[in-house]
Each structure stands twice: as structure tokens, then as C-alpha cells.
Amino acid sequence: MPQDTEETVHPHSFAAELARQVYSDLTGVLTGGDDKDAFSVTAEGGAEGRSRALWLLLRAALAAHRALRFGLDNAFAEPHSEDVLDALSLLVPELAASADHATWHEQGERLATSISASEGDREALHQALARAIYRLYDGLRREDEVQGGRGLVELRTMLAHVDAAAQLGAAGPLSTVVRPDRFHDDFLRYVEVAQNHAADAQQAVATLQRDGRITAIVTQDVHPVEQARETLADDQYAERLRIEALLDFLSALRRSASDDPLLRACSENETAFTALVTAAATVPLRGQAGFEYAALAQITRYNLRLLQSAAAQQARAH
């Protein structure tokens, strides 16, 4: 990470170096688990592709740099798109030259707006990214390891998700994300009910009476999925959509690629399975289109890294 945020460090250089380092930190996560350089892979394509995530990161880095130098008010200032393009030019000149700053800004803003909407518009993506960068460097200069560490984890987490969303293109809004811990519990409960009613069940829908006595019960077939859906509240449509999308994804993967490394890992390792289910809670999803393999696998790898790191820290503490 660039250590010096004083006036001697140009904002464009600060943003460019930060981007290189964060992408380097996520090598393996953003590149399908192999050793390819994450920055070079995700910098491919133009303003309408995966590189939009890089644009948004640079924009947030410039805003955070300004706040570190001149102080933070209530919100992070929006940098000029020309400055963001200049920072991009330091990293990948040919990529910066592929579109003008207005086009980059439009495509990046479209992606950011879509992601913020899927998160309930709690905070604009630009503000959240800039705040994570600010926490990281403010923690470093004040030697506050807790704050700096928090900022770094937030930054890596957000970039992994923004990059995954950028891979989906711009066809339609993103589905609402849900809390991973609640989704994990809802998913397990849903699957348990569906498995316990694997054979179609009968449900009473009416009674036939004669002289005030029930003489017959009219029933209808109830599919296990319908019974499983009853475990979710009426306002849990987002959970239902993601649960069923995950089940469809796993079913299709078993049919088409039973030896897939992601499927094998999640079948053999409980931690990997937890990483997959919690990834399905937040990974970018386009409505009824189902999960994209690359996006879901990417967030699963990132979650698995976090879970394994937490387990290692806990083991050392004991």
C-alpha cells in the first residue's frame, strides 16, 4: 500500500498504486483460483466491461486522498472524471484511451447505482469505498491497527463484489442482497423441509359434509418446494429467489460437471460449503437469470479465504 499521503504524493499516483496493491492482494480470488495477475486480467476490456470496477476504485481512492490531506466533512467529495481518467492512464494507458472520461463516468455510475440499489441504497458505493480507504490510511498514520485492518478488509470485500457485478454486464437490475448469516440458516431450513417431503404430499383444501358431519376431505398434491417455501415469510422474496437460484445452480453443475473443483470442495469440506452458501447471499444476481458461475465462484473463494484466516487466528489464540 502507498504509505505516504502527504502533499509530496500526487493524488493520481496514490490512486494508481493503491489499485495495483489491492488487486494484487486479491490474486487467486479474481482470477479463477490460479496465479494469474489479477490486475492485468481485470484491466482487460473497455468501459462497459470488467474494468468498470477499476474505475470506481480509482474514483474512491482520489476522494479518500483528498479527505486524508484536507480533512473529512460529512461526505467524500466526488473527484472530476478527468482526474480519474488521468489516474487510469498511469495504470493502463491503452485502457484509458479506449473511451473518453464522460463514457467511463457514465458506465461506472451505472454499475455503482445498480450495486447500491441491491443493497437497499443504505450508502452510495462511492462513499462506502472511499470510507474504507480512508479508514485504512487514517489507521496507518495513527498506528491504529484495528481501524486500519477493518478498512483493508472492507476494501478487499467491496472490490471483490464490485468486480463480480462488473462481469455480469448491464442487462437489468441486480437482485437484493441479504444478510449472510440469516441466509445460511434459511437455506439449511429450506433444504431440510424439502428433503423431508421428497415425495409429493397431500394437503387438505376442502371438506364435504352431510348432516353436519364430514364425509370426505378434498386434497391436492403439494410439491416439496411449495412446502419448503412456507418456511420463509411473505417478505422474504429475496431469500427465496437466492435459495432456489443456488439449488438450481448446484443441480445444473452436478449434471454438467460433476468433477467441478468448486462442487467437489463444497461437498467435501464444511468450511467451503459455508463459504458457498454465504456467497450466494450477497453475490451479484440478475433477477431470474440465476447465478453466473464466475461471480459465485469468485465470492466463494473470497469468503473461504476469510473463514480460513479467522480459523487460523483462533487456533493461534488457543
Image: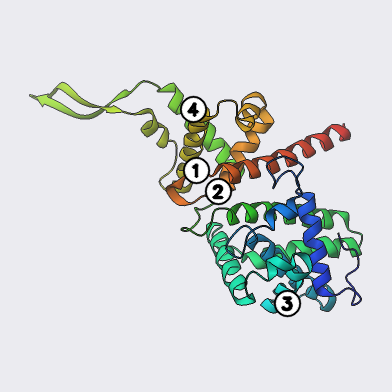
Instruction: Name the foreground residue: 52 vs 248.
Output: 52
Determine the secondary structure under disc 1.
helix
Can residue 60 be seen in the rendering of this structure? no
Within-10-Å neighbours for mark 2: few <14, some 14–19, many 20+ = many
Determine the secondary structure under disc 3.
helix
* Cα separation between marks 3 and 2: 35 Å
Tell me: residue 41, above or below residue 116.
above
Could you say which quadrant of the image residue 58 lies in? Answer: bottom right
Quadrant in which the C terminus is drawn: top right
* Cα separation between marks 3 and 1: 39 Å
Instruction: Name the foreground residue: 89 vs 9.
Output: 89
Residue at the spot of label 1: 242
Q: Which mark is residue 255?
A: 4
Residue at the spot of label 3: 83
Tell me the residue at 78%/57% (across/down): 151
Determine the secondary structure under disc 4.
helix
Mark sitting earlier along the chain (2/4) = 2
Residue at the spot of label 2: 178
**Three-letter code for the amino acid on which mark 1 is drawn:** Arg
* Cα separation between marks 1 and 4: 20 Å
Q: Are marks 3 and 2 in contact (CB under 8 Å)?
A: no
Q: Residue furthest left?
A: 211
